[in-house]
Image (tube, rainbow, N blue to C red):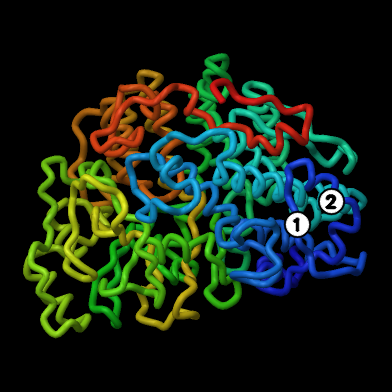
Amino acid sequence: MYKELKIMRHIFAKTVIAGLLMMGMTSCANDLNISSIDPQTSTSYEDMELLAKVYGTLGMTGQKGPAGAGDISSDEGESGFYRTTFNLQTLPTDECNWAWQTDTDIPQITGISWNANSSRTQWAYQRLGFNVLLCNFYLQNTADKADQADYKYYRAEVRFLRALYYWYFLDLWHKAPFKDENNSMNDLPVEKAGKELYDWIDAELTAAENELAPIGQFNSASDFGRADAGAAYLLHARLALNAMVYTDGAVNAYDKAISYCDKVINGPYALSSTPKTSPATGLTYSGYARLFMADNDENADVMKEIIFPIRQDGIKTPNYSTVSYLVCSTRGAGMPYIGTKNGWTCNYARPNLIEKFFPNDDIPMSSDDNVGDGSEAAIIALDAQDGSDTKGIIAAAGDDRALFYAGRGGGIRKLHTDKLNNFLDGISIVKWQNIRTDGGTTHDPEFSDTDIPLFRLAEAYMTRAEAKWRSGDATAINDVNVLRARANATPLTQLTEQDLIDEWCREFYMEGRRRSDLVRFDMFTGKKYNWAWKGGVADGQAVDSHFKFYPIPMDDINNNKNMTQNAGY
């Protein structure tokens, strides 16, 4: 039924869009102050290469690899879709802190004190705008093929991706510079905000769902990474769960969220629940841990949970903006099982993340800096003695999701600190790994093979639980306990608001969504919930409500008369 030439093979092949800027994209890029680089000068291109580029921008940053010919004229490593959105969703929250406080805009992002000239908000805004631009260009230039069977799927997949990017605009900025395939390249984007943008995404997903491949069709080795109806259903559920925030209270869509979660949960997916012992490390990795390991695109049990991944390969997609960012930024020299030759010593856990698993601050930690002969084997043995290795921490937490390291490798760590600028000022997070459970060798010693599970089945369970809880349905607790059972954690006997927001964190920490959840619970700004270094002070403090959404970058305000600034900036 499908062409032998699969789109996912194109993603890992040469994905050059020849002459893209020469064919009218420049004016659209300029609307967002993007200087896109393309090394080609020919005006010819293949639409399958264009489709590959559309998908490729999920996990790559330019035309060549980790550096050179980037899509956007900024630090290429900082410009990728996942890194830019992850930073805005995670670094200001209770999950982690970036140690290098001298880096551009980091104090403002980690302390929730950004303004309309923030570089990091602009990088994310530009990347999303560029990716929307590519989607529109593909849809414009394949309109004459819309009735062909394969192109029906391809075009629906691109519509899903465009809806995803507009969802990020809505979630992060509460508005978007909007254009679709019906606009001229010379048209300035118009502003769609709040309920208007919500309604458009809602309608667009509804239309795309009817054109996408059936739910679970691409949950297979041959097409893993393509979007089928399951991905659209889960995005639709996410949109509906946040409807009250996105529409300023005008739309209650909890019933819709439940309905879409039912479709996903009753579909062909299954939670990754089977542990496996690696012949290389001798460690046993839980079904949960295996979701975030280098062979997660080869394990059938794991793939059944991953509804829509961002494909990654250390050789074919080397970059500093996707999974290598997550692995390298949370590692440092001397840590065992590092999985990369380049530990950046950047991201570490804020104490509030650890408290989700250890409410009494009793996480096992090394206090003796003795490393024996300094070898990895010696460090592993000494850590095991005091239970500060990941295995010991999981056992003490009684939860397989407690993927942390508090041993002596790289130095002695702290749980609480009076400063922010040292990697050892917090517990290390080792959730993301570039290690294979089968003991095999990864493709590259630095860049990671691990796919990003952008949408996975567990989200459907948590979304349905919250939507039911907000609707007064006492069965909501059952969905939470399904995930706790998978994690070998004690089931909850009650479900409060605090239980829900904490469980979202335990299941999804460091997956680039925490800010969105905190906003929905009215805990991101104000004084309802403070965490370490919220508002830039050690014990945390309330911040003004206008920080609930990011500012429209001043470059776009100045270049596009249709865009207005968010309140408070």
Residue 26 got which mark? 2
Residue 436: give x, y in percent of width and height: 39, 75
How far is the residue under mark 1 from the one under mark 2? 8 Å
- Neighbour class for label 1 at 10 Å: few (<14), some, many (≥20)? some
Give the farthest residue toward the top: 250
Residue 160 visible somewhere in the drawing:
no
Three-letter code, disc 2: Thr
Residue displayed at 19% across by 32% down: 493
Three-letter code, disc 1: Ser
- Seen from the viewer's position, the closer of residues 389 and 6 is 389
Q: In the figure, 475 relative to 411: above or below?
A: above
Residue 314 got which mark? none
- Seen from the viewer's position, the closer of residues 212 and 324 is 324
Discs 1, 2 touching: Cβ within 8 Å: yes
- Neighbour class for label 2 at 10 Å: few (<14), some, many (≥20)? some
Look at mark 1 in the image and give the residue it sits on: 36
Residue 48: give x, y in percent of width and height: 79, 64
Q: In the figure, 320 relative to 181: above or below?
A: below
Q: Earlier in the sequence, mark 1 or mark 2?
A: 2
Left or right: 409 with respect to 70?
left
